[in-house]
Amino acid sequence: MKTDMEKKARLLFAQADHVSGEVTGFAIGKIMDLGARNVQLISSITKKNRPGNIIIIDTDDEHEGVISEFLARELKVSGYHRIDTSHIFQQVTLAQKNLVIRMNGKRRTFRCEIKIIGDPSNPLSIDVEHDVLVKLQKVLRTQKKELSLCELRTAIESKLRAFGKEITLEV
């Protein structure tokens, strides 16, 4: 049974050199604001041995014009490559579970958003959203409990396949 889906996509590849990290960081946010679905940077060395970046922008034809103008105005990009392609993706479902943290004899409950990839009745992958981990880490720090985001992710995701609306962690 085929479970992946397809939609038309457009990737823009732009090369930018002579741009500071601060400007590059600003540019990523602005390009997202202008309608990109995603922006990625690859560090590179240009033909004159200068540091540069390859900017990969996932967008559509509706937003390409304003993104193109921004690239020229802010980053001095005089041209770029465009690849019209297909984005192949799996079904993604967002769900909620209660996350119960037991710590120092106390119990606290949080809403935990999870992402289910594939058919929810037989998922290919289940993961916890990053924002949930960051919020939980802050709460734990107020209780003098230090856990890395990696440790939290592993502890939570190891229990996500269990049936029911509640996950319990002992910390």
Image: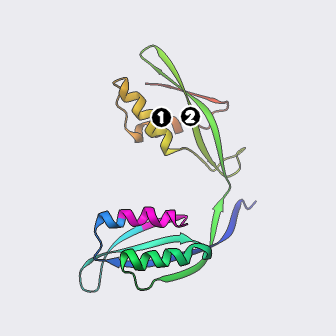
Residue 6 versus residue 119 in the image, above or below: below
Residue 159, disc: 2
**Residue 139: image x %, image y %?**
42, 29
Q: CA distance from mark 2 to mark 1?
A: 7 Å
Camera-side residue of 156 and 66? 66
Residue 70, quarter of the rendered image: bottom left
Q: Which image quadrant: the N terminus?
A: bottom right
Task: In the displayed orientation, state which residue is furthest to the top.
Answer: 105
The 10 Å Cα crowd at callout 1, few under 14, some 14 to 19, many 20 or more, is some
**Residue 123: image x %, image y %?**
66, 47
The 10 Å Cα crowd at callout 2, few under 14, some 14 to 19, many 20 or more, is some
| Label pair 2/1, CB-CB below 8 angstroms | yes
**Span colored in magenta:** 25-40
The residue located at (38%, 74%) in the rendering is 74
The residue located at (52%, 67%) in the rendering is 34
Camera-side residue of 76 and 116? 76
Q: How many marks?
A: 2
The residue located at (41%, 16%) in the rendering is 104
Tell whether position 31 is magenta: yes
| Residue at image mark 1 | 155
Camera-side residue of 101 and 22? 22
